[in-house]
Amino acid sequence: MDRKFTIVRYIAFGIEILILFILQSTPNLIPEVFGGRPLLLIPAAITIAYFEPEIPAMFYGIACGILLDLGYSDFPCYYTIMLGVICFLLGWVFRDYMVVSFFNATAFSAVIITGVIGINFLFFYVFAGKGEAGMYFLTHYVSKIIYTFLCGIVLYFINKGLFRSLLDY
């Protein structure tokens, strides 16, 4: 079996992750909507995990997590651990038990994005004892969750196209 398309696909996903990190990290490039900016690397890792086996998916999750921890985390391994485990499980579930479809992808993405960002809010805002947690969640985190989810829909189609165009035959 010819493996050159697999290597090209892995490189393409890596370049996509770097581009998304640059876009996400550049100040004032992506506009804030209702106080929140999207975390583009979360849906990137998740949508790559839908199409790849569990081990490569886990490494993409870890890579996205490391980049998110460098720029957006108060705890230095939160996103790395979360995305590594989640992407491993997604790669395993979608390889063996489920079919990748738009409906499945959007449902899983909504739950995972809400969970990862919501747990981050709980640990590093609520449990840290910062004041007015409910109002801060409504003004910053709800829009961040929705914005990230909407970007995830676009990334689903981009990664699906990359995967299908660089599939080994």
Image (cartoon, rainbow, N blue to C red):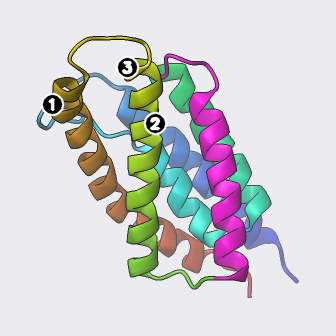
- 165 or 138: nearer the eye? 138
What type is the residue that disc 2 sits on? Ile
Disc 2 from disc 1: Cα separation: 17 Å
What type is the residue that disc 1 sits on? Thr
Answer whether residue 155 is visible to the viewer in this image. no
Extreme residue in the bottom direction: 169
For label 2, the crowd category at 10 Å Cα-Cα, with few meaning under 14, some 14 to 19 and many 20 or more, is some
Q: With respect to residue 157, does 16 lie above or below?
A: above
Q: Which of marks 3 and 2 precedes in the sequence?
A: 2
**Residue 22: where, in percent of width, then height?**
43, 32
Q: With respect to residue 72, does 105 lie above or below?
A: below
Give the extent of the magenta segment.
Answer: 73-97
- What residue does disc 2 label? 119
What type is the residue that disc 3 sits on? Tyr
Q: What element does badge 2 sit on?
A: helix
**Residue 76: where, in percent of width, then height?**
61, 19
- What residue does disc 1 label? 139
